[in-house]
Image (cartoon, rainbow, N blue to C red):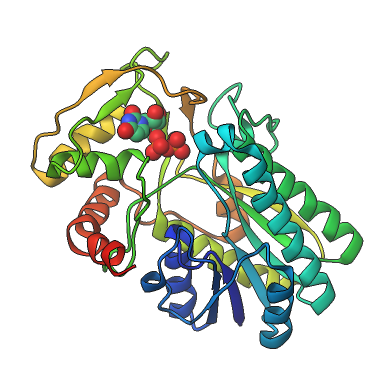
Amino acid sequence: MKILVTGGAGYIGSHTCKALAAAGHEVIVYDNLSTGFRKLAKWGECIRGDILDEEKLRACLHTHKPEGIIHFAAFSQVGESVSNPDRYIRNNVGGTLNILESMRDTGVRNIVVSSTAAVYGIPEHCPITEDMPAHPINPYGETKLFMEWMLTDFARAYGISWTALRYFNAAGADPESECGECHTPETHLIPRALMAVTGELKDFRIMGSDYPTQDGTCIRDYIHVSDLAAAHVLAMERLHSEASGQGFSLNLGTGTGLSVKEILHAVEQVTARRLAYTTGERRAGDPPVLVADGTRAQEILHWTPRRSRVDTIIEDAWNWHVSGRDMVIRAD
Ligand code: UDP
């Protein structure tokens, strides 16, 4: 297949492009490079374009006639979405609407989109299944949920087929260190912990140690980015073979939760370095526990997480941190 990947120069997007190319598909990246890196868009042609640029997007679909779209391009910082909701709504909702309208008008029928565990808000219990109520507690989660509703509407009205993949905590890096996480600023736990052990980050803090968990710190379900990438390829191949004109949402997680302290311990083990930390206030909007029930994705996509053991995740992230990350950021 020929697949257009919006946000293909970003973290999960670049790993998915590599997985698509490895499975024999042709990749076209469509990315405005605002948070992505051209150096990470190396598995196909890279078109610099914005999903808000409706004309360019439509022209791109018209020219390239992809069999499907995998849509990553979005803003994804929870805190920023609280202070700038308009920006998030315009980009995540407005941008997705442009994509869906362009698909309808150019006859592209299949789309896989990145969604998030943030659609659930604070779940009543864990593990979380897809039919539990979605009550997002920040604008980021709201925009992703609205995006799923738009997909439902477009499927019904125009026969578009879709899969929304609700990621839990994406982590790790390509096992061959060809791509990995490079956010600026970096807010995520594992890369920040790695920056702390190298001395790049002087004031690493655990954000909240009074949660109702066994060690008082938040529990998350960390899933290797290469496992996420594999799920996108399977989801797109499935849409292509079934052409069903419908869609659904699937959790992508391992079903196992780890606390912040357990992650920090694993970082010390893998890097064989000491990690100095302080303990501070909770971060606003952090649910105490988020763990996926990933059964539905495993059944429907025939997908199994393969690299999501915590030591493998941290080993891959560490290798990327010391070998590839700086080069990509500097080259930009
Ligand atoms: N966290 C932390 N210190 C940091 C960064 C994150 O204690 O410097 C905690 C955060 O409060 C959350 C967990 O680590 O409980 C995972 O956070 P991350 O930002 O990686 O992912 P999120 O769960 O917010 O998507």
Front residue of 69 and 236: 69
Query: What is the total number of numbered labels drawn onto the structure image?
Result: 0
* Above or below for 41 versus 125: below
In the image, taking residue 286 as reference, residue 194 lies left or right, namely left
Residue 104 location, quadrant: bottom right
* Above or below for 167 versus 256: below
Q: Quadrant of ligand 1?
A: top left
Q: Residue at x 77, y 64 (%)?
A: 100
Give the quarter of the figure containing the N terminus. Answer: bottom right
* Above or below for 280 versus 21: above
Q: Residue at x 56, y 33 (%)?
A: 83
In the image, taking residue 81 as reference, residue 54 lies left or right, namely right
Residue 179 location, quadrant: bottom left
Residue 211 location, quadrant: top left
Tell me where residue 283 appears, x and y as whole percent. Answer: 43, 24
Tell me where residue 30 appears, x and y as whole percent. Answer: 57, 72
Give the quarter of the figure containing the C terminus. Answer: bottom left
Front residue of 320 and 310: 320
* Residue 292 visible, this angle: no
Front residue of 312 and 154: 154
In the image, taking residue 293 as reference, residue 212 lies left or right, namely left
In the image, taking residue 122 as reference, residue 202 lies left or right, namely left
Q: Residue at x 48, y 65 (%)?
A: 33
Tell me where residue 154 appears, x and y as whole percent. Answer: 84, 59
* Residue 164 visible, this angle: yes
Which residue, as the protein is rendered here, is positioned at the far bottom?
A: 63
Tell me where residue 175 appears, x and y as whole percent. Answer: 28, 64
Front residue of 165 and 72: 72
